[in-house]
Amino acid sequence: MAAQATQAYRGGDVAQFSRGFSGRPRSEEPDLPPGQYRTHDFPVLSAGPTPRVPLDTWQFTIVTEAGERHSWDWKALQQLPSESVTVDLHCVTRWSKLGTRWRGVSLDTLFEDVETASEYAYVRAYGGYTTNLPLEDLLDGQAWVAYEYDGDPLAPEHGGPARLLVPHLYLWKSAKWVQGIVLTPQDEPGFWETAGYHMYGDPWQEQRYAGD
Amino acid sequence: MAGTALRRRLTWRPAQLSAVRQETPTARTLTLRVDGWAGHVPGQHVDVRLTAADGYTAVRSYSISSAPAEGELEITVDEVRGGEVSPYLVREIAAGDLVEVRGPLGGWFVWQPQSTRPLQLVAGGSGIAPLMSMARARAAAGGGAPTRLLYSVRRPDAVVFAAELAGLAAPGSGLEVSYAYTRAVPEGWPRPAGRVDAALLAEATWPAERAPDCFVCGPTGFVEATADLLVAAGHSASAIRTERFGPTGSTS
Ligand SMILES: Cc1cc2nc3c(=O)[nH]c(=O)nc-3n(C[C@H](O)[C@H](O)[C@H](O)COP(=O)(O)OP(=O)(O)OC[C@H]3O[C@@H](n4cnc5c(N)ncnc54)[C@H](O)[C@@H]3O)c2cc1C
């Protein structure tokens, strides 16, 4: 595709983009989705100031299409069985961080008593952030409400006290400061999705922007 | 709305470097000509793709620093030492060379030039780029919004756009520019070198009662700290939009 565009631009000459650019020496990184580079620190990206959510008022709520509410306060969340997971993170801004260690509650546990026919989850966060994803992407061991990172309580800038963790999608789907999920029959765009980002966000398909 | 306008397929487009301007010892502005480019909203960025002779590509995001224009845009790149892309853009690429761009991108960290609400801009290092687009667009639109810019930078010779900012901030322009130097100050400067703190913020930015729209842009550590200070000074979190450029911990 790039070659085609160049040819059109240069009237048929075989021209080359980025004369003199050679890139960094590369080694095979089989765990990296296309277009990603590996980082060893932990970048922070969010749209506004970091919300500080006190634990004594924290709640996580799932609301079904019938209006049924399932809520957990901080203590109730801590009493649920937790899991330790080691996962790779892929941010749409092109960094990936491999082998990150988390502890949290599986969404399978939180959805145990939830009855729904909805296919979509609209995720809300403290501070007003929202994002959307298919409900099936939250179940079957694919997603957690995580509250520990690398053995420590999750820091506010990384979404503490608790964030959603859905490592198989771009990281903007893993809403920081998660507050709850509203189940909906239709897929409604969230914060970044309204601003032109992809409705699903599979890193391996490079689904970055709407239409990718 | 910018958001809805973006819900279409974005393709890579050839961009030809038509001019370069050295801004500081480490930063350069690149003027890119893009056929059919329809302009942007101040605050938006582009993805820039470089292709090596063996087909390898690298993509990075750069804010658009120019005022909206058709057929052309400018980015201002500061070299990150040891980086893969920024050293090439700051030192290698020359007029006539081709890259590819995709955009304009971003429907959140944007400012509409027709707005007349008080505007507070806070830049750290290369975070000045999208805020400069806003300041230029504001001047081009006749300057309705009373605006303050607080620009945090390591040392005087690292200030990008110094002369143009001085011109834009002429008496009666409605734009006030203040500097915070974090490593070295100009001769006779009244404050010692140091990071933006609550006292400087109180002096150089709109008080919360004016309810300004706030745009904070720069390296992550800088944005984290300043956005927190703005909230502590009484600004509502929903009035503060941020864009973080880099990894954790780095500050200007
Ligand atoms: C929305 C957006 C807009 C941006 N706009 C601009 C802009 O207008 N001007 C501009 O100069 N940059 C901007 N950036 C940053 C830019 O995309 C690149 O990250 C930067 O140029 C470094 O790329 P590189 O390939 O040279 O370094 P890399 O090869 O990616 O990184 C090399 C080393 O430097 C570190 N590093 C990477 N980026 C930074 C950074 N920004 N600060 C400090 N250390 C870093 C990495 O962790 C790594 O260790 C923007 C980023 C985003 C997300």
Image (tube, coloured by chain):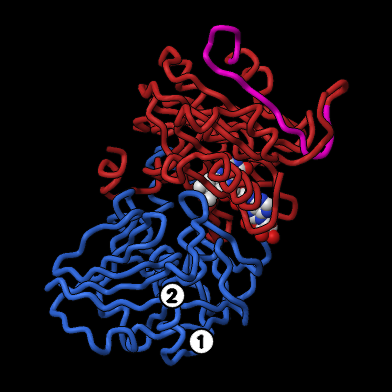
Chain colours: A blue, B red
**Is residue B137 positioned above or below B199 on the image?**
above
Seen at 67% across and 25% down, the residue is B178
Task: Say which element carries label 2.
Answer: strand
Q: Position of residue A39 (x, y in %)?
A: 62, 67
In the image, B71 versus A210, the foreground residue is A210
**Is residue B133 positioned above or below A1 on the image?**
above
Tell me: B173 left or right of A119: right
Q: Which residue is mark 2?
A: A165
Which mark, residue A85?
1
Q: Write down the quadrant of residue B126 in the picture.
A: top right
Can you see residue A18? no
Can you see residue A168? yes
Tell me: A182 left or right of B35: left
Subunit of label 2? A
Disc 1/disc 2 C-alpha distance (Å): 10 Å
Give the quadrant of the C terminus of chain B: top right
Subunit of label 1? A
In the image, B17 versus B60, the foreground residue is B60
Q: Mark 2, residues whose alpha carbon is within 10 Å: few (<14), some, or many (≥20)?
A: many
Same chain for the residues at labels 1 and 2, yes or no? yes
The reply to whether callout 1 and callout 2 are in contact (CB within 8 Å) is yes
Task: Say which element carries label 1.
Answer: strand
In magenta segment, residue A66: no
Q: Position of residue A88 (x, y in %)?
A: 52, 77
Please name the amino acid that badge 1 sits on: Val
Seen at 51% across and 27% down, the residue is B66
Q: How many marks?
A: 2
Magenta part of the chain: B169-185
